[in-house]
Every structure is written in C-alpha cells, then in structure tokens.
Image (cartoon, rainbow, N blue to C red):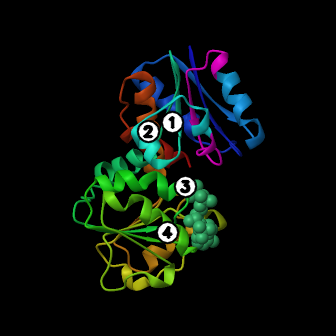
Amino acid sequence: ADRYAVIGFPIKHSWSPFIHGLFAKQTGQALTYTRIEVPPENLDRDVNAFFESGGKGLNVTVPHKQAVALLTRFRTPRAEIAGAVNTLAAQPDGLLGDNTDGAGLLADLTKNLSLELDNTRILLLGAGGAARGVLGPLLGAGPESIEIANRNSDRATQLVNEFRLLGNLRGCSFDEISTDGTFDLILNATSASLQDTIPPIPPAVIGPTTLCYDMAYGKGDTAFTRWARNAGAGRAETGWGMLVEQAAEAFQLWRGVRPETKAVLEAVKSQK
Ligand code: ATR
C-alpha cells in the first residue's frame, strides 16, 4: 500500500491518521498513514529518507510549515503566497509543496457553517504563520474588508503591506481595533488558546450575527470560543472542521479523489 504520514514536533496527539484512515476506507483507497515525530534539526534528513524509501506524501504541522518549503522543488501558487507548506507530494521530477489550510478554512466556513463571505467585515487575530496561511484564500472570497490585529502591531502592518494588492486591509494592535460596529467574522489565528488565554479584544465588536471562529481546537470549547459566546457571539466554533477540510484537500491532491467530509467530521467530534 502507498505510504503517507504527518510530521511535526510534537506529533503524538495528531488526529490526521484517524481522519485519513476514514477517508481511505470511504473511498476504497489502499494506503497507510502514520505519525512521525521530527525535531527541527532532523527535518531535512527525515523528509528525504521518507521519500527516498518510497513514501508518497506527507502532511506537515507545527513547527515545520515554513522550513519545509525550502525542501520542495515545486510549490503551488497558494503555498507560494502563504509562504508555508502543509502538504508534500512525491512527483516524478521532484517534491511538490502545497498549502491546504486556507482552502480548508474556507470550506468549513462556507460549506459546513453556511457563511457567505462576500461583502463581510472580517477581523483576523494574529499575524504569524497561521494567519498568513489563510489570508490569501480569505481575500479571494471577496470580503468588504479584513482588519488584522496582533499583539505586536508591526507584524500586522507587515502582513498588510505584503497582501494589500489583494484586498481592503488594515493592520493594528488589539487596542486599536475598530469599534464602529460589529464584525461578521472574527477569526482567532493566534496561538493564545494553546496557553488557555484569549487575545484582548473589545466585546463591542461582537454581536448576535457575528461568527467567532478559533482555528485551534481541543476538547469542547477553547478559551476563545467560550469567551466569545459569553460576549454575545451568535455562533462560536473551534477549528475541527478546518482540520478535516484541509485533510480532504490534501487527500484529493494525493489520490485524485475528493472524500466526503461530513461523516468524518462527525466521527472526529464524537471521539474527542
Ligand atoms: P503560528 O504558526 O501558530 O501562527 P507564530 O508564527 O509563532 O505561530 O505566531 C503566533 C501568533 O500568535 C502571533 O500572532 C502571536 O503574536 P505576536 O506576533 O505578537 O507574538 C500570537 N500570540 C501568541 N501568544 C499570544 C497571546 N498570549 N496573546 C495574544 N497573541 C498571542
């Protein structure tokens, strides 16, 4: 059977083997999918060893998404724009790097959560790798504006400068967030949830029509979705849907078949 895996550090708790295992079963594809723990100093060696021994594809997670791009011979436009790679595919002429995170987020928002993104006001919290990875696809969905707020406002401004030709962007710090009205979508792309804290944003920007989305996920609510619901958000969602949808995009790239995500997302949510 063709071999696939997810690499990261740490990697023990990754749900990707479970998700891809269900995709394979559902589509009748013969493949194996495992976890490989790869510390940063071994990235080059371990990725090359995996593909030299006949491996077909890897998913890449924290902290390798930017570094692994340097090991690819080809990159899809969306990986190039994101400056990060989360999917590697063996090709006859060399390694291809793709980034399915943004498409995964968009699929979850528009398909699973039925959110129309055109002409919406979006607040993006964070300006690190996770924010950068989804900014291009988000802008492609035609929002009215995206405000990027970050603890270090210089990083938000830098991101705005880099993406400004693609849409209406503003960068600021958390205490400079526009308070003239609520946002349609507030996306948490900071790693604050991992420390069980929330980015300090004014509750006034949240209303009954606001969807608050945390790209992080855990058992039940995250600190951000719990806070958002208390602050009056119409809906607050964690990132499980994005996780499953980015996996479906990777599976399609590797196998040429699009798996159904609905049942898999339900299975993941009932297991966690
Ligand atoms: P990732 O790939 O997860 O985005 P990263 O590139 O290290 O990782 O970026 C982490 C993001 O979370 C940054 O936007 C960071 O803010 P700074 O740029 O100001 O460091 C943000 N972040 C991390 N911890 C945070 C916290 N406790 N409160 C608010 N923002 C936080």
Callout 1 environment at 10 Å: few (<14), some (14 to 19), or many (20+)? Answer: many
| Type of amino acid under label 1 | Ile
The tag earlier along the polypeptide, 1 or 3, is 1
Q: Is residue 175 above or below residue 147?
A: below
Amino acid type, label 4: Ala
Q: Of callouts 3 and 4, which one flags the residue occurring earlier in the amino acid sequence?
A: 3
The amino acid at mark 3 is Gly
**Where does label 2 land, which residue?**
264
Q: Is disc 1 placed on a helix, strand or loop? A: helix
Q: Is residue 266 toward the left or the right of residue 111 in the image?
A: right
Count of number-bearing discs: 4
Give the position of the N terminus as an image quadrant: top right
Q: Nearer the viewer, mark 4 or mark 1?
A: 4
Q: Is residue 272 above or below residue 71?
A: below
Q: Which residues are magenta?
A: 51-67
Circles 1, 2 touching at the beta carbon (< 8 Å): yes
Residue at the spot of label 4 = 156
Residue at image mark 3: 129
- Label 1 and label 2: CA atoms lie apart by 7 Å
Element assignment for label 3:
helix
Q: Nearer the viewer, residue 66 or 182?
A: 66
Q: Residue 237, position in %: x, y?
A: 43, 61
User: Which residue bears the numbered disc 1?
Assistant: 19
Q: Is residue 100 visible?
A: no
Q: Which comes sooner in the sequence, label 4 or label 1?
A: 1
**Front tag of 1 and 3:** 3
Expressed as whole percent of the image width and height from the top left, the position of residue 143 reads 27, 62
Q: Earlier in the sequence, mark 2 or mark 3?
A: 3
